[in-house]
Amino acid sequence: MKEFFKINHHDVGFANHATEGTVYSPGALDTEVLVRKGKLRISLLTPSLEITDELHNGILQDAYFDNLRKTAWIRLVTYHDLAIEGGTYDTQIVCPYGNHATGFEVYGFPEDVRFHGIIDVQAGYVHLKGELKSINKGNQVHRVPIEIVKAFDPKPLLPKRKVYTWEAAQSADPLSVFELTIGEGNFDHFPEKILSFKNLESLWVGARSNFNFSEIPAAFYTLTELHTIQIYGSEISQLSEDLVQLQKLEELTLQSSALQKLPTAISSLPVLSHLSLKYNKLKELPASIGAMPNLKSLDIEGNRFKTLPASLNNIKSVTASRKHRKLFMDLSYPSKNTQAIDETKYDLSNYPAEKIALEKRLRAIPDLVDFTELILAYSTMATYLVLEATTTDIPLGKSKLGGAPDLPSDWEHPRSEQGNFYLFHAQLNCEALAPYQPYLPRKGMLYFFVNDEEYAQRPLVLYAEHTENLRRIEYTEATKFMDYDYDGAVRDAVAVGFQNAIDFPIFYNSYNHGSERYPKYAALWEEKDDEEMYEKMDALEGYDFEQLAIEMKTPLALDNGHIQIRTHSINSSVFSQHESPQEIAAGKLGGEPSEWMVLLNMESVGEFNFWDAGTLSYCIHKKDLAIQDFSKISASIESS
């Protein structure tokens, strides 16, 4: 049967989509129909498309949708893999098929809709026929007919199974226990009862249960019907080479355990597709692991690797800390600038008096004295944007936030392919900034834009060397922005001046991120298992640097006359609960986090508010900045 994806009787085709910059994991945005663990996985995606009147059939006739009809994709997907009743093909599934949120879901359509119709599952293809109905409008007249045919490899299905708890399994017929969950209890020895479940296909251990033993007995590996093993929280330190007997195993998860070595037998499991070994004590992996024929996903975050095989590059999705990815990947940054970074432009080298005063104060603080050199090395002289009272009649070409930009007369305002405007955040006059720092251009204007303030996936920083002929852009009530929340709600312009202040590194959560953020002193975090050093590092992480800043008369927040407010800044450290803006930039575009700098950090001040009073940071690689190349910018939002 011919494959097609028809919306309102128009064939729009299928596509796969890159996941960078989205909330989806690698591989999640692939068009695929497959059988895994005896269940059916359906994920069907269109290409990027404009949902025209011919496609939406009137469901998007409200003017609210005028700026939303261009979509990256429409996706119909099984929220959880489908267990087919009876485990046979030639089965029809009526949708919606659940009374709760899980089911066959629709994403990417501008209106919240649900698929109503039939999924016809045949040996070799699925045929979907029905319509999209609005979730919000009940039995409204406008509906969108949907019909899709997609082929797949018809592997054997398993019937829907009853899930047994550990307690219920004790009195059940052992041969009827196919899926077992152990959610509570402490087990000092492997629970031998499991070995009686000869047909066991899935084992889940977690929640309030603990496997307090180091080794799984050899007899466990004779349960050859197992397709899924998930164990969370245990003292298991080794897996036997007998693992090779589990030829039907598709998923193996052993997380938050004590695993020290992975058996080479893992590479002989022919259908293993998902392997998660997060938070163990692994120092290496078998060299052949990347040659496994069906391994699509490997999660090895939170281990102690000293070496990793290059074959990991063959696996579609590998989740690992950046310092471990460097063991098997080239993560260098591809700048056009071949010269080394001059770090003296960014640290305190050009401020000897302030550096000497800071060193003297650090050596007098018991919690910080052992880290004096670290703090000195990664403190910067940040430039803060001082908000002025001027919000009207701001001179053309003056540094400002909000409003509309003053662009060179031959420039167009940045827009999307659909003609919608990027959001304008700031323009910074480089000549006015020149006395405060040595790394930005000495003249000209920098302009900061972003596509939206939800994910900030497409930031733009534009540099105009010549500013003799500027014109102020005018926004009107008819102006459409890429982030439609700002249609008709443009921020007022605020003039800004500048002020320098020492900015200290942020050590919150440095237990997990310190070696990446501060590579010159990475050895400090390598010693985190040493109890005395751990206590010192804990004190460093909890120290109140804001109080130190006040003592040094270099406040983290500037005084506007009667209250202290946080303000926007350049070359500063940004508080983050997880990855810093520089780590996010390095993760997306390459290079070391320490090679990136905060070109502009936007705080939630005045009319600016990012998520829950958070920050939006623009970052640039220092090599690019040195040659005034602003073509590759990373932006990220941090909020509680």
Image (tube, helix red, strand yellow):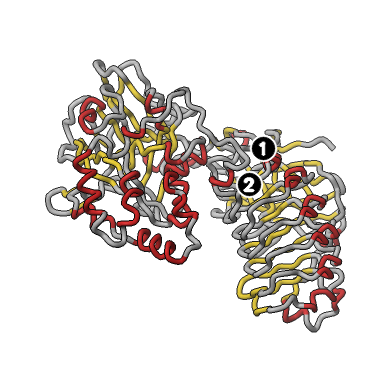
Q: Residues within 10 Å of mark 2 (few under 14, many from 20)?
A: few
Q: Which mark is residue 321?
A: none
Residue 483 visible in image: no
Pointer 1 with pointer 2, Cβ within 8 A: no
Q: Residue furthest left?
A: 561
Q: Residues within 10 Å of mark 1 (few under 14, many from 20)?
A: some
**Closest to the observer, 5 or 359:** 359
Q: Position of residue 625 (x, y in %)?
A: 38, 28
Determine whether 209 is above or below 524 in the image: below
**Closest to the observer, 336 or 29:** 336
Task: Residue type at mark 2: give it.
Answer: Thr
Horizontal side of residue 136 vs 38, given as left or right: left
* Residue drawn at the location 37% of the way across and 35% of the way down: 423
Horizontal side of residue 110 vs 621, given as left or right: right
Disc 1 designates what residue?
Answer: 16
Placement of the C terminus among the 4 image quadrants: bottom left
* Residue drawn at the location 76% of the way across and 69% of the way down: 216
Horizontal side of residue 107 vs 374, given as left or right: right
**Closest to the observer, 402 or 74:** 402
Determine whether 199 is above or below 587 in the image: below
Task: Residue type at mark 1: give it.
Answer: Asn
Determine whether 197 is above or below 461 in the image: below
Placement of the N terminus among the 4 image quadrants: top right
Mark 2: secondary structure: loop
Q: Position of residue 180 (x, y in %)?
A: 75, 71
Q: Position of residue 86 (x, y in %)?
A: 85, 63
Determine whether 145 is above or below 445 in the image: below
Q: Can you tell which quarter of the image residue 371 is in?
A: bottom left
Q: Position of residue 171 (x, y in %)?
A: 80, 84
Q: Report the mark closest to the observer, 1 or 2.
A: 2
Disc 2 designates what residue?
Answer: 307
Gap in angstroms between the C-alphas marked 1 and 2: 33 Å
